[in-house]
Amino acid sequence: VHQTRTPLTILQTHLEGVADGMLAMDAPEIGVCREQIGSIEASIANISTLLDAELKTDDPVAEPVDLAALLRQIVRGLKVQFDQKGVALSLQADVQGKWNTDRYKLSQCVYNLLNNAYKYTGAGGSVVLTCRQSGQVVTLSVRDTGQGISPADLAHLFDAYYRGQGTQAILGDGLGLYVVRENMRQLRGSVQVHSVPGQGSEFVLTLPQCTTGRQAAENQ
């Protein structure tokens, strides 16, 4: 249920933009909407697997993913919201070819980190999504100029339902970073955070090639 909120919000924002004449319903815009519908469908599919005792729901579904194209799609989907708030969102991707990983789980991680950056960065601030490849490891980072995280909160940041000090007035249920940590564990990767109160935060994902789990049906 938590994971359906982001794509629904993006769909609503973009359809409002089309209705107001701010966006054109062209091929790229249709692609954004299709991507969000796909995310909702994947969330529903994951719910159905919870009812099937024969399936391990934490197994990644590996497939070759064009990371640069995926990240551009994610940024395009969120940029309207960021622009409306007055927060600059940009992408710096230096990765070639395709990367074997679970597209859905990785997308969840990036969306959740960008949504958090959006929530805790005020107007006039900036958020930068960076992707770099070094050998058999890809590093993705989300860096913002927001309010930062207190040292007392850092130890519990990835706990389910944990809300940090001073965040009660901001909408959320404390599941986003928990999902990020669990997805990265399933992908045999890691997540780290560096933050200074009042100066912003940076979340760093380390992602190896996915060599375990199920293969996507179209690649079998």
Image: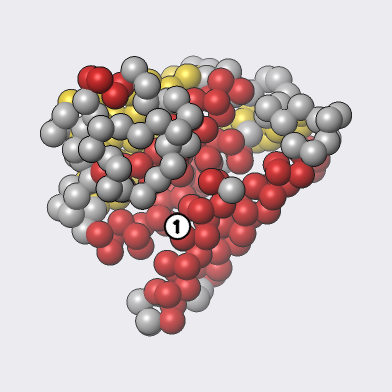
Residue 72 locus on image (x, y percent): 45, 49
Q: How is the image coloured?
A: secondary structure
Residue occupied by mark 1: 77
Q: Is 136 situated above or below 95?
A: above
Residue 90 lies, with reference to residue 24, above or below; the image says above
Image quadrant for the C terminus?
top right
Q: Secondary structure at mark 1?
A: helix
Quadrant of residue 105 within the rendered picture: top right
Name the residue located 54 percent from the left edge and 35 percent from the top edge.
Answer: 106
Q: Residue at x 19, y 50 (%)?
A: 122
Which percent across, then down, holds residue 12? 47, 68
Label 1 Cα crowd, 10 Å radius (few <14 / some 14-19 / many 20+): many
* Pick the front one: 18 or 117: 117
Q: Is residue 66 left or right of residue 49?
A: left
Residue 83 appears anywhere in the view: yes
- The residue lying furthest to the right in this view is 54
Residue 14 place in picture, x, y as percent: 44, 68
> Which amino acid type is shown beneath numbered disc 1?
Gly
The residue at the point 49 percent across, 25 percent down is 181
- The quarter holding residue 194 reads top left
Q: Residue at x 19, y 38 (%)?
A: 147
Answer left or right for 215 relative to 68.
right
Give the mark count: 1
Asked if residue 141 can be seen in this view, the reply is no
Judged left or right of residue 216, residue 183 is: left
Q: Position of residue 151 (x, y in %)?
A: 23, 20
Considering depth in this image, is 109 or 139 the residue closer to the camera?
A: 109
